[in-house]
Image (cartoon, rainbow, N blue to C red):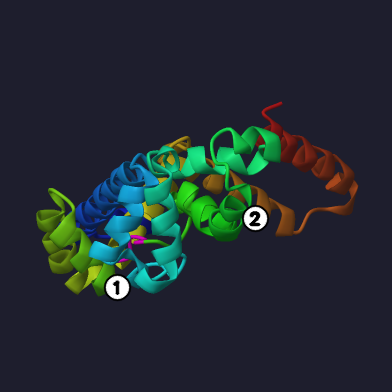
Amino acid sequence: MAQLEKERIDMEKVRRHEEFLKNIETLKAMRSEYIQSLLSKPVADLLGETEGHPLREYYDGFQDKGEMAELMQFLSDYPVFGKCNAGQICEFFGCSEKKLSHVCPETSRFKKVVMGNRSLFETVGSLEQTSFLAVDDNNEKALDFYARNVNGAKDVVEKIRQLKLEKNSDREEYEKSIQMEKRREELGKYSKTDLEKELKTIGNLLELLHSKIPEEKQEETNQGLIYKIKSLLFGE
């Protein structure tokens, strides 16, 4: 307890690291919103956007423009599919051929072109759980993307870059402050005065235990010591 009272924390470092963590969480929330905006887009628009940014640079689950040409043509020929989002496209994968033929007479083409890209649509549907544009202060490429393409992210990214310069030393002080606070809570249930009294009592008992006692009083003393120790430990 005395040692804990002597410890000192650099609160400015703690504040900086808390601000750093807060901005990281803010950017993660922006990532989630951005991905949800992608998932809500019709697949024709979404795949067109992957050509524009291009998103494939940030996650290899997206195909390049050449590989998607046949798929984009199919979506153009069948706008009913092009207007669906990725999750809705995936629902067609479980349809029977008869049911599918009502929407797309060229069922074999659907199987070849759309179901042939099943992993793409399923990946897009679970994009938030992938490494796509994962928030990492060391990933400058992803940070650049957010700063350029996500509304409000530029200031957050700049703050992260500024605060991460002292991240390691700030984090050490932050973690130290957490450990100290945890230790204070653990020791908070104890009274320093009561502990000192108990230590003094224990010291007296030890002194008595190691003192020379006449043989005829040994048993009586031992019983007394046992009683005192039990009283001290168990409050009897």
Magenta stretch: residue 159 in it?
no
What is the CA distance from the residue labelled 2 to the residue labelled 1?
A: 61 Å
Q: Is residue 16 visible?
A: no
Would you identify the image quadrant in which residue 100 lies? top right
Q: Amino acid at mark 1?
A: Asn
**SS type, badge 1:** loop
Residue drawn at x 83%, y 53% is 214
Query: Range of the magenta residues?
Result: 133-138
Q: Is residue 116 above or below residue 234?
A: below
Q: How many marks?
A: 2
User: Mark 1 = which residue?
Assistant: 138
Of the image marks 2 and 1, the number of the one nearer the N terminus: 1
Magenta stretch: residue 134 in it?
yes
Magenta segment main secondary structure = loop
Q: Amino acid at mark 2?
A: Glu
Q: Residues within 10 Å of mark 1 (few under 14, many from 20)?
A: few
Residue drawn at x 58%, y 40% is 92
Q: Position of residue 110 (x, y in %)?
A: 57, 51
Residue drawn at x 46%, y 52% is 124
User: Mark 2 = which residue?
Assistant: 207
Q: Is residue 210 left or right of residue 171?
A: right
Q: Is residue 55 above or below residue 15?
A: below
Residue drawn at x 39%, y 41% is 79
Q: Residues within 10 Å of mark 2 (few under 14, many from 20)?
A: few
The C terminus, quarter of image: top right
